[in-house]
Image (cartoon, helix red, strand yellow):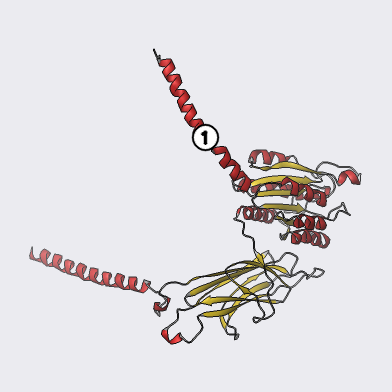
Amino acid sequence: MITRKRRAAGAFGLLAALAAGIALPAPALADETTATAPKVNLVLDVSGSMRARDIDGQSRMAAAKQAFNEVLDATPEDVQLGIRTLGADYPGDDRKKGCEDTAQLYPVGPLDRTEAKAAVATLAPTGWTPIGPALLEAADDLDGGTGSKRIVLISDGEDTCAPLDPCEVAREIAAKGVGLTIDTLGLVPSTRMRQQLSCIAEATGGTYTSVEHTDELTDRVNQLVDRAADPVVTPVAVEGADSCPEAPALKSGLYTDRAEFGQQRWYRVDVLAGQELRASVSLAADRAVNPDYGVLLRAVTVRGREIVRGEAAGHGRTDVLSTGLRYPKPERDDDDSDKPAAETVCLQVTGSFSAAPGVRTTPGLPLELTVDVVDGPSDAGDVASFGLGRGWWLLGVLVLTGFLAGLLWGWLSRWRVAVWRAG
């Protein structure tokens, strides 16, 4: 005879088995998500010079801690984040030991914000500035997985562990082809430090930013962490020409190039009748440039007639300057049957940047060009002269409806008045 207890135990066992069966695929899904998760390793200089009190009335270390706490709060859930230090533990004068002073403060992985903040709170400016060794270790921290990988280096001084040149270390990392980007931020930078951090960033396609205020540091690190979470699109390297006839022909896609100071870059795109060309360009100031600069993107015909343009200006506090344009090519009429169906549009990119004194002008500034050729809006040739398109018909219906409603309301009002007087 089956008792109630046995029946309950059997039911519980069945539910447990079903739950276990349903839960079996979950680890595989978790593993897949982990394998593709973007990874960011924040590398912080904790050398003795971080004691200097020249950032918003507080020490560089205090500013970095404050920025890190805000960044940890804002880190997207799907980003695996870690923190590595350099110069945080050895306070002595032994150069060999000082140049080995790099440690993983918080391992790269799912973020426990409380634990990470507690680790950051223990930091105090201590020793040397072994940037090269720290970058090598930071790259190893990011090993594994197929998601994007990014190192964000924050330092207030040059590497003190030559001959291991951190710029050569960055080139070595880039040569491995692991798709790792290094971005650098310089706190209260000097010329030599700016040159070194710029070189590190350039070697891996990253960016360099000079920082003199806490909010700037917070905003920039947040931007870089968010960028790691964006879908990875690998740009195609292309070399623009000095004129349209020699320019490379581009199709829809993302392209990267470099533009020398004051240099024009030309590209060609074929646009069919009824299609729309959408293009945008970004120029990155990856080194010190003079304030007041701009970028111009022009679409012109092969004969030099301007079709449309986009332009933007900066004033010294913007790292990346972007602009864009749209060109909808009308559908062909019967009278245009003797004309070619495709039109070659020449895209001209001009940057009005100038290098600050003592700054290298080569290689050129990083340029990113997006080209998108899509089907144009339907019935583009039927757009009314008022620019409303099909909205013109809607406006007409609304006007007619309002007119009829007014007549009806007026008739009802007069009828009510007549009834009132008769009564």
Q: Residue at x 83, y 61 (%)?
A: 192
Mark 1 element type: helix
Relative height, residue 401 to residue 302 (above, below):
above
The percent coordinates of residue 165 (x first, y second) are: 85, 56
Q: Report the side of 423 relative to 140 (left or right).
A: left
The percent coordinates of residue 319 (x first, y second) are: 68, 64
Q: Which residue is mark 1?
A: 23
Q: Residue 21 or 203: which is nearer the viewer?
A: 21
The percent coordinates of residue 418 (x first, y second) are: 11, 67
Check the image and name the residue furthest to the right.
94
Please rate how many residues cluster around mark 1, counting C-alpha atoms within 10 Å: few if below 14, some from 14 to 19, many from 20: few
Q: Residue 228 or 31: which is nearer the viewer?
A: 31
Q: Residue at x 64, y 71 (%)?
A: 313
Check the image and name the residue furthest to the left.
422
Q: Residue 272 or 197: which is nearer the viewer?
A: 272
Q: Residue at x 75, y 62 (%)?
A: 202
The percent coordinates of residue 377 (x first, y second) are: 44, 72
Relative height, residue 78 to residue 357 (above, below):
above
Regarding residue 95, the answer to whether it shows in the image is yes
Relative height, residue 228 to residue 334 (above, below):
above
The amino acid on which the numbered mark 1 sits, given as a three-letter code, is Ala
Write down the quadrant of residue 410 in the picture: bottom left
Regarding residue 59, the answer to whether it shows in the image is no
Relative height, residue 167 to residue 389 (above, below):
above
Quadrant, the C terminus: bottom left
Quadrant, the N terminus: top left
